[in-house]
Image: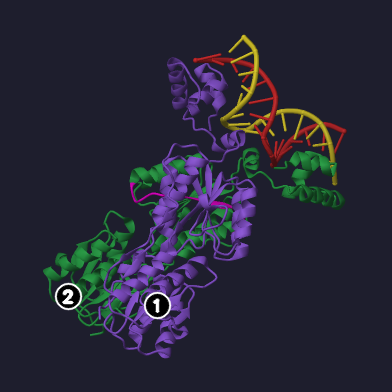
Chain colours: A purple, B green, C yellow, D red
DNA sequence: TTGTACGCGTTATCAC
DNA sequence: GTGATAACGCGTACAA
């Protein structure tokens, strides 16, 4: 591998000048710039990014922590983030936190030890306090899908509560009154918010919530499976169910059908997230759109703007969900 | 950030000794090791991985190129690879090639400029020659899902042809004789192989292939949608269709139903890949399992063994597919 | 077993 | 505009 030194020799200039044309951060006469460029070309020179990092104390890498690498949700998130950063010549290092406090902390430590210039965190298990502490520790970061007091400008969130509201409202508008709710783990902030939205919609229609209409699931297929079974058993007159994410909705659909119900005639179902497989389902799932890709891009822009000093417009920090009407809701 | 130098001062030893206890690659008296460890602890010292890389010309990072970051297929691949490497203290840099020659080359160049110690490539558009050339260029790599002559020990592949064979054989065994085939883009090696397997199964049963039973799709939902329409139009007596991947199968199922068919009674469908959503479908999709996670791990082990000199058992380079029987095939 | 000294490939601060 | 030269934080012969 050719080095900057060989380039400087061949071009007949100093190291400093070569460095200047590489970074073009200082005036260089056009003639000498050409000489240098030529020399680089002849030698097939590529800057050594490690050495650049050491000298500039900037790694040009951004660490990302997500819950899972697989699953439809994080795929689109990562995809859009990677695109945004690569365009800027930065690269992305990814780690999975698995919604586990220890693993999330471990991932963050790992990324910090990798000298990332910034972190984008989709973490669920660590506490707000931990994040505030992390904020003191030097490595800048932005938080996805979670609102932390005193870090509000670094939080890119979805209005989860409004999403939960919309899901239930959609059902109510279609005439449903006995509505079951399969929630995510209530210790997760988004699960709680979505449920609150559900309650708010119910209240608006003067309907009281009953514990027999609530099931706390796990955000996975199994939660939907068990949830439907439990709900149908507790109250056979349910005409609709809101699932706090699409994976649970998939489990719910399967199980409801196995119990002999025709969908959506006998039972309407609304999901949440609008993941890519939600319209492979049958009936095609009516759900709440979670613009996770756009939110990831916004997080990337925050980093580009604040860490790499790119001139960018203001950052949108809260996103609004909306109903995606498909075929899984029956009007009565 | 504390440096090795401060540690050495506080511990009253030399830089070299501190380095030795960090890497424990040379004998150090237990007493002094403890002193050093203590000092590191007091200072909250963490080695600067960038400086380590520069000095050792080793970045401890592995570059991965996949076609897409989203999509169910690559998610499980990346997830398993990341887990395997992180356990070894390595990290993974990911880039998307989008099945486009220019972008794939760009991704590889990008990763090389990042001083990755090795690359894991799932590339489709670049030529075999390009890969052979890349092999001369220094950066070691392993190839996923593709066999390149003269690089055979670096290729981790699925027996795609046998997979295609199994899919069609399964249908034949269930009494089907008029079998449509929706292929992936035939310039992709795996698409071609799967189709060849299909033909082989047909031949074994003495059935001749007809062009009216073949449709070349795109490996995406749309290919399945158009494929079913074309196939059904060309020959209304088709009783079954093999789709060369699950996404096309999803499109096929939807469209067949929209055309008034009852599945699987009127039309049986077999997919390929066994992606996570294939059992969210209705009917649950019978498909061919592609053990992509295991193959990714194997690629990771290759790197660990050959690049980082870890003692590991031999590497399995070719994997076998198998039929996953679910509900989308009707016996006649 | 431990210490010295140099090198890794750049960036950045001075002078000129 | 351009050129020396000192960092950047660590690994590693070589010497002791």
Q: Mark 1 lies on which chain?
A: A
Neighbor class of circle 1 (other Cα within 10 Å; few <14, some 14-19, many 20+) is: many
The reply to the same-chain question for discs 2 and 1 is no
Q: What element carries label 1?
A: helix
Residue A211's place in the image compared with A148, above or below, is below
* Quarter of image, res C8: top right
Task: State how far apart marks 2 and 1 are (Cα).
Answer: 31 Å
Chain part drawn in magenta = B87-100
Q: In which quarter of the image is the C terminus of chain A?
A: bottom left
| Residue B325 placement (x, y as % from top left) | 36, 79
Observer able to see residue B311: no
* Quarter of image, res B122: bottom left
| Residue B15 placement (x, y as % from top left) | 78, 39
Q: Mark 2 lies on which chain?
A: B
| Residue B187 placement (x, y as % from top left) | 28, 53
The residue sitting at 42% across, 68% down in the picture is B320
Find disc 1 in the rendering and name its residue: A251
Quick one: B75 or B286, which is closer to the camera? B75
Quick one: A171 or A256, which is closer to the camera? A171
Q: Is mark 2 on a helix, strand or loop?
A: loop
* Quarter of image, res B207: bottom left
How many numbered marks are there? 2
Neighbor class of circle 2 (other Cα within 10 Å; few <14, some 14-19, many 20+) is: some
Find disc 2 in the rendering and name its residue: B238
Observer able to see residue B43: yes
Quick one: C5 or B249, which is closer to the camera? B249
Left or right of residue A328, residue A200 in this image = right
> Does the magenta segment cover residue B90?
yes
The residue sitting at 83% across, 52% down in the picture is B34
Find residue B305 and name its label. Answer: none
The residue sitting at 45% across, 52% down in the picture is A317
């Amino acid at each position: 591998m050719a080095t900057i030194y060989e380039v400087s020799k061949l071009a007949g200039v100093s190291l400093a000048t070569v460095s200047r044309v590489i970074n073009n951060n200082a005036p260089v006469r056009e003639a000498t710039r050409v000489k240098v460029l030529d020399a680089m070309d002849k030698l097939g020179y590529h800057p050594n990014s490690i050495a650049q990092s050491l000298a500039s104390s900037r790694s040009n890498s951004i660490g990302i922590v997500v819950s899972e690498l697989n699953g439809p949700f994080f795929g689109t998130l990562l995809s859009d983030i990677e695109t945004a950063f690569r365009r800027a010549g930065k690269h992305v290092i990814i780690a999975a936190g698995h919604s586990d406090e220890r693993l999330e902390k471990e991932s963050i430590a790992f990324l910090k030890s990798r000298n990332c210039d910034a972190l984008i965190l989709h973490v669920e298990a660590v506490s707000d306090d931990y994040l505030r502490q992390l904020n003191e520790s030097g490595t800048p970061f932005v938080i996805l899908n979670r609102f932390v007091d005193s870090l509000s400008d670094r939080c890119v969130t979805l209005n989860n509560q409004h999403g939960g509201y919309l899901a239930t409202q959609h059902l109510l508008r279609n005439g449903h009154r006995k509505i079951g709710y399969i929630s995510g783990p209530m210790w997760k902030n988004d699960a709680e918010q979505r449920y609150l939205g559900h309650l708010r919609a119910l209240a608006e229609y003067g309907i009281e919530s009953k514990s027999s209409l609530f099931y706390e699931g796990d955000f996975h297929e199994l939660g939907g499976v068990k949830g439907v079974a439990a709900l149908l058993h507790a109250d056979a007159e349910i005409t609709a169910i809101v699932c706090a994410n699409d994976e649970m909705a998939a489990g719910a659909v399967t199980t409801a059908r196995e119990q002999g119900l025709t969908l959506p005639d006998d039972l309407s179902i609304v999901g949440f997230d609008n993941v890519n497989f939600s319209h492979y389902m049958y009936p095609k799932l009516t759900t709440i759109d979670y613009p996770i890709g756009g939110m990831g891009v916004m997080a990337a822009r925050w980093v580009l703007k604040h860490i790499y000093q790119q001139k960018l417009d203001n950052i949108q920090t809260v996103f609004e969900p909306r109903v995606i009407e498909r075929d899984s809701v029956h009007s009565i």
